[in-house]
Structure formats: structure tokens, C-alpha cells
Amino acid sequence: MLDFRIGHGYDVHRLVSGRRLVLGGVEIDYELGLLGHSDADVLVHAVMDSMLGALALGDIGKLFPDNDSAYKDIDSMLLLKRVYELVKSKGYAVSNMDVTVNAEKPKLARHIPKMRENLAAVLECDVWQISVKATTEEGLGLKGEGIGATCVCIIEKVKP
């Protein structure tokens, strides 16, 4: 078995009125929120997909289908806990993670420390192992109509 594995995750959701904006488990005061079956936390969704990809276990749609009412409006941090339990059951732990959020608005810099803390708490690692960055797409790409996130992670085999 490999000592470490690398995974990549990506998610994007449309911004709409009447929804909360949650990123990295942080509720952000903004007039729009992300449309989705769960709370649509694209940052956490990208994190989960990166870990699942590292172990070739599919994606979050396979584990938590959007046609299952059990996941309607669910907190994505709860789903992250379930994914991390699966990762641990395979004998792995997070070595490091690098997340980038693509959003024209709102500005996210002041929320990043809390996002990192939230992720580190669930993933049972130190904050320094989790990087979260935010960038705009310079008016290209999503053009303020949505928010996307990418994540690259390394998970390592836990030594007995």
C-alpha cells in the first residue's frame, strides 16, 4: 500500500437570493447564497472530493446523492466528518491541503482564519496543514454568478 496519496477536488454553485452563504463552515453575511441540495458549501465539497479522489472512492455525489432527502440543507461540515471517518477507516490521515476559492464577491480574506480552524478541527490536524486562499477571476469565468473552489490534498498512511 502507498504511504501517501494525492487527490484533487472541484465544486461550483450558483449564487441566488434566499439562501445563506456558507464557506468552510463559516456563515458569511452577504445578500446571496449558494444554490444546492445541502448548504452548498463549495469549499468543503472540494475538500471532500479531494480526499475521496485520493483513495479512488468516487465523489460526494456517490456518497451523498442529491436526490436523497436525508441530505437536504445538511451542514457540509457534518458530511466532511463522515468522509474523514472513511479516510481514517482506510488507515490514512491528512498530511496537508491547499484550497482556493474563486469568488468575485464577497471579499473573503477576514473569514479565512476561521475556515482553516474549522477544517483542521474536523480533519484532526494542525491549522498549518490547511491552506485556504481566495481569488477573483478578474471578471472572467463565473462573472459573479457563482462561487467555485478547488482543493489538492495529500493524505498519508498512518504508521502503527
Image: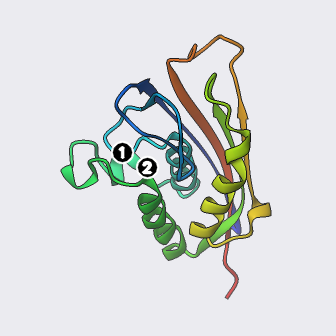
SS state under label 1 = helix
Q: CA distance from mark 1 to mark 2?
A: 8 Å
Residue at 64 percent of width and 70 percent of height: 93
Are the residues flagged by discs 1 and 2 in contact, CB closer than 8 Å? yes
Residue at 43 percent of width and 25 percent of height: 14
Front residue of 47/89: it is 47
Q: Is residue 128 above or below residue 113?
A: below
Residue 156 pos. (x, y %): 69, 68
Q: Residue furthest right?
A: 128
Question: Residue 94's quadrant in the figure?
Answer: bottom right
* Residue at numbered disc 1: 61
Q: Amino acid at mark 2?
A: Gly
| Quadrant assignment for the C terminus | bottom right
Q: Is residue 141 left or right of residue 138?
A: left
Q: Amino acid at mark 1?
A: Gly
| Quadrant assignment for the N terminus | bottom right
Residue 58's tag is 2
